[in-house]
Image (spheres, rainbow, N blue to C red):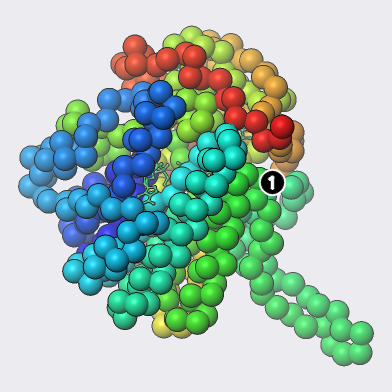
Amino acid sequence: MRVLVLGGDGFCGWATSLYLSAKGHDVVILDNLSRRKIDAELATESLTPIRPTPVRLQAWKDVSGRTIQFHNLDVAQDYADLLAMLNRYSPDAVIHFAEQRAAPYSMRTFATRRYTVENNITATHNLLCAIVESGRDIHVVHLGTMGVYGYGTTGDVPVPEGYLKIRITQPNGPDIEREIMHPADPGSVYHMTKTLDALLFYFYNKNDNLRITDLHQGIVWGTRTQETEQDERLINRFDYDGEYGTVLNRFLAQAAIDHPLTVHGVGGQKRAFIHLRDSVRCIELALLHPPKGKQRVQIFNQMTETHRLIDLAHKVSALTGAKIQHVENPRAEEPTNELIVQNDGFLKIGMAPIALDDGLMLEVINVARKYRDRIDPTKIPATSRWRR
Ligand code: NAD
Ligand code: USQ
């Protein structure tokens, strides 16, 4: 397939681009490098020494003999160029990673709230609008989030894959059965943009018959894939800082430098997780199983397991001897929740989940140990507060 990867220089996008290219797909990356600029703005950087994009691409050509095209393009600002790219490459699919993805950054200042909404919503809308304007039949695969469902305790009711069966009682007639989009319950401005994306998908699917797959992904952990390991210049991003670092990768990086594991509150929060290697495989599965004809937006829960944060902290502590520190939670979120997730969609089409185990966690710790001198401990605390 020919695939445009929007946001292909980022953490998930880079690993996905290499994986798809290795599998023989023709990959073109569009990215405005905003994530690298935000690192500079926050005076931090990836724990791993990621190389400039042209160096990465040359390295991939050297090791694989394959070419990945790259264009520096802002999907939210450069509409005409985006449309021109769709016409020039005529892709079978577009994978859309190109959004500001950190909840803490989205809550950092009023400027970052506004940036996150303007960037994410306009990027998504520009893509959908440009596909319609191009007149081409292009499958959109979007990286959404498990966070669209919210983390209200659901007891033993699994979170369905996007749609909820409901029954409406009529005063003078039989009950009406419907399947509706699962109610949205975002926990940050960032997560809110993903719930708004979902409405854009609903409309463009209904009105213009766009074929769209929305992947409600859990927290991605790990950093390496088979492809990124092939050359030091292909190394993938690893965020450990308080804005962009996600919880399990942060715990593993903290353990690597004997920093206490920063559990927010009691650590009763339960979240969904997926290893980066499973994430890239799921994306290929989604490409290979597009919605057909006038099918509604296809939604998969892209996750493999759920864990309570305090349990994860204990696992990492048992493995490394790291201390656990309960810090005041800067977020507004339930201190404890239940979470059971349906993920049959991917299981049915071939996902073989990688379980979170000590070996894989040690692999991440070893990467962090190798580059430990690049960690700035002052960047570890999560300082963005949800409420003033
Ligand atoms: P990332 O920040 O590392 O990558 C995003 C990339 O998109 C960056 O390279 C950035 O420069 C680019 N980008 C942002 N706005 C752009 C624009 N307007 N035009 C062009 N390029 C733009 O993030 P990631 O961790 O790779 O996440 C990718 C996607 O997956 C996001 O949409 C995120 O919401 C979703 N996701 C990530 C995780 C996770 O744990 N990392 C979990 C669930 C979902
Ligand atoms: N947390 C800690 N300690 C830390 C960091 C985080 O206890 O040092 C807690 C947070 O309070 C939260 C949980 O860990 O309860 C998850 O935080 P996170 O930063 O790992 O994940 P989140 O903010 O939800 O966002 C990440 C990605 C986002 C993606 C989302 C998937 O940044 O792009 O959409 O995971 S999900 O969580 O399933 O919605």
Ligand 2 location (quadrant) = top right
Whether disc 1's CB lies below 8 Å from ligand 2 is answered yes
Choose between 51 and 220: the one closer to the eye.
51
Task: Using the rendered view, name the quadrant where residue 368 is placed.
Answer: top left
Task: Using the rendered view, name the quadrant where residue 373 is placed.
Answer: top left
As drawn, which residue projects farthest toward the bottom?
173
Q: Secondary structure at mark 1?
A: loop
Task: Using the rendered view, name the quadrant where residue 111 is placed.
Answer: top right
Against 348, is 72 above or below? above
Against 372, is 179 above or below? below
Count of labels in the image: 1
Instruction: Pinpoint residue 354: horizontal percent, then vertical percent.
Output: 43, 42
Residue type for callout 1: Tyr
Q: Residue placed at 41% from the left, 83% from the top?
A: 293
Q: Which residue bears the numbered disc 1?
A: 151
Apparent side of residue 188 relative to residue 27 in the rendered image (left or right): right
Choose between 133 and 343: the one closer to the eye.
133
Apparent side of residue 261 relative to residue 340 in the rendered image (left or right): left
Q: Residue placed at 54% from the left, 75% from the top?
A: 203
Q: Residue placed at 71% from the left, 32% from the top?
A: 388
